[in-house]
Image (cartoon, rainbow, N blue to C red):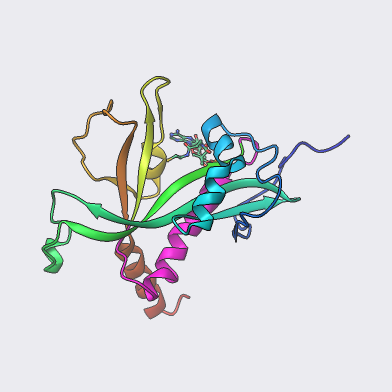
Amino acid sequence: MSQARFEGIDFSEFDVVEMNPDLENLGQGFKCLRNDFATYIKGRKIRLECKSLTSKCWIIEHDEKIAGYITLMADKLTTEYRLLENEGVEYRTFPAVKIGWLAADKRAKGAGRRLLEWALEYVTTDLINRVGVRFVTVDALHDPDTGYDIASYYARFGFKHVDPTESITPKCNFRTMYFDIKTVVEELNALRRTRLI
Ligand SMILES: CC(C)(COP(=O)(O)OP(=O)(O)OC[C@H]1O[C@@H](n2cnc3c(N)ncnc32)[C@H](O)[C@@H]1OP(=O)(O)O)[C@@H](O)C(=O)NCCC(=O)NCCS
């Protein structure tokens, strides 16, 4: 009997690799809780966005099947609050990296977590050495028609709402959230100082 796709696989330490937009049959068989996320990985749009350098996509694969994907792009976080006032920074606009699309195959439990943790680590340990970036942002999907809301998922990882008073039924179908990279950088530095890593 053939094993069901991704059955019993622990994705927590899987490699995350850059997607090749020239691959044929990209995302074939990918099934997601939300169809729009399955359609996107199979369609032309993601390929065009990667080729035009407006987005970059990384994937987790098993047996040449995509278990999950994430896209990242440059962003700016604009708020009405001076988020870094206590650091002497008066701006209300900050350099950021945005999570564009994040999806796991519905049979690949844990692939979403692996991708999100990988992205936060990538920005925190790699990107910040190359370009100024303080926050990771995401437009957390809220679908008033179905009640689907992903904000609490991101909150578990430490993301906060840009506008904590924003209505639960926003005019648009998302609420922007942000993750402060510096807190992680400081924790890593503290660990290094105690020679634990
Ligand atoms: C969100 C998503 C990427 C999570 O990936 P995953 O590999 O299935 O799940 P993870 O291992 O990362 O996380 C599982 C946990 O998240 C929780 N979770 C899943 N969807 C959630 C939601 N919409 N709101 C809150 N929690 C959610 C699960 O209940 C589970 O909780 P548990 O650990 O207590 O059992 C995946 O469900 C998905 O592709 N969803 C559709 C696309 C989507 O919404 N993407 C984000 C758009 S901004």
Q: Specify whether 44 is left or right of 5.
A: left
Q: Residue at x 65, y 43 (%)?
A: 27
Residue 162 within the segment the image draws in magenta: no
Inspect this view and state whether residue 109 appears.
Answer: no
Residue 129 image position (x, y, % from top left) = 39, 75
Q: What is the total number of numbered labels drawn onto the structure image?
A: 0
Q: Residue at x 65, y 36 (%)?
A: 107
Q: Residue at x 42, y 50 (%)?
A: 99
Residue 113 image position (x, y, % from top left) = 52, 48
Q: Quadrant of residue 38?
A: top right
Q: Is residue 161 above or below residue 35?
A: below
Residue 68 image position (x, y, % from top left) = 59, 46
Q: Residue furthest top?
A: 145
Q: Which residues are drawn in magenta?
A: 106-135
Q: Quadrant of residue 154?
A: top left
Inspect this view and state whether residue 47 appears.
Answer: yes
Q: Is residue 145 above or below residue 77?
A: above
Q: Main secondary structure of the magenta part?
A: helix
Q: Specify whether 80 is left or right of 69.
A: left
Q: Residue at x 32, y 69 (%)?
A: 186
Q: Is residue 92 above or below residue 186?
A: above
Residue 81 image position (x, y, % from top left) = 13, 51
Residue 124 within the segment the image draws in magenta: yes
Q: Is residue 130 above or below residue 25?
A: below
Q: Residue furthest right?
A: 1
- Judging depth in this view, the residue of 39 and 191 nearest the camera is 39
